[in-house]
Amino acid sequence: MNTQSTRLEKSLECHKHTESSLRMRRKKVYCEAASMDIAHANTISSLAQLAENHFCMDCNHPEVTYGCTTFYTFVCSSCAAMLGQFGFVTKPLVRSTSHLKSFRLGGRYYHKKHGDGTVIRVEAATGVTGQMKKEDADKAEVTIKFDSGAEHTYNHHSHHKLTPRDAFSSNDVIGFLRQGNKAARLFWHANDAGDLEIPDASEPEKVAYAMKLRYVEKRWVKVEGWT
């Protein structure tokens, strides 16, 4: 009887040790992935600061906050939303979670305690939903629903525990290094004879229409195909 009990205890200890090892391995993988995400994001954010990328590709707004990984261009938040309506992929440039304004609906984040989750609400103290203004960032709250079913709301004191999951990949880094706004305009506007004016950010309908002509109809592309 004692021998059986001893064997059972050893088996339980071995099982606990295996579970602990698996948890440690998962944690290591998550940490390595987060570090890689940050490295990619920092590289792309640095590229966005270059003079040739400093203005939005589609409306010339002076503050680019998103990278479009469909065309490898840098755009403002308004144009990022419009591009999304056409089915093109954009990702926020601000990867540091010290800025609540970088959170967006549908964004995926990892929490070391709760695991992966999705942003289901982003709001300021006034209850306005959507992209945060700089002055509202310290008043904002984000609510995340985790895959486990739990929901938690974070403010500017607590959200630093979250790691972005909609991160840039190594292929994205290569794409932005090769492309960027200057090269993209040479490609998409090769046949406009220099007469085309980029619509102003204050005219969103014109910006959206220009996007349709540029990316969907490929009105000014000299040679078909994206290289």
Image: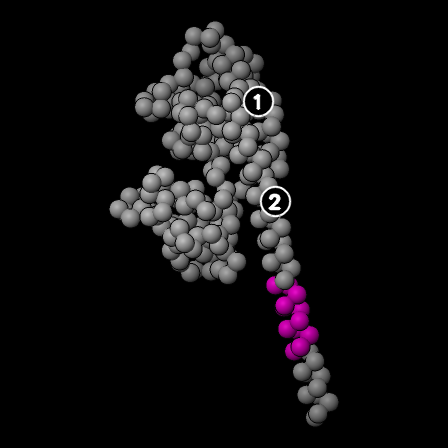
Q: As shown in the figure, which amino acid type bears the numbered disc 1?
A: Trp
- Asked if the magenta segment contains residue 8, the reply would be no
Residue hosting label 1: 226
Magenta part of the protein: which range? Answer: 12-23
Q: In this orientation, does residue 178 appear?
A: yes
Tag in front: 2 or 1? 2
Query: In which image quadrant can residue 175 be found?
Result: top right
Q: Secondary structure at mark 1?
A: loop
- Report the coloring of the rendering: one colour
Q: Identify which residue is drawn at 42% across, 11% down.
A: 196
Q: Nearer the viewer, residue 110 or 161?
A: 161
Q: Identify which residue is drawn at 51% across, 22% down.
A: 51
Q: Identify which residue is drawn at 71% across, 83% down.
A: 7
| CB under 8 Å between discs 2 and 1 | no
Q: Is residue 215 above or below residue 12?
A: above
- Report the predominant secondary structure element of the magenta stretch: helix
194 sits left or right of 121 in the view:
right
Residue 92 location, x and y as percent?
47, 38
Residue hosting label 2: 36
Residue 53 location, x and y as percent?
50, 24
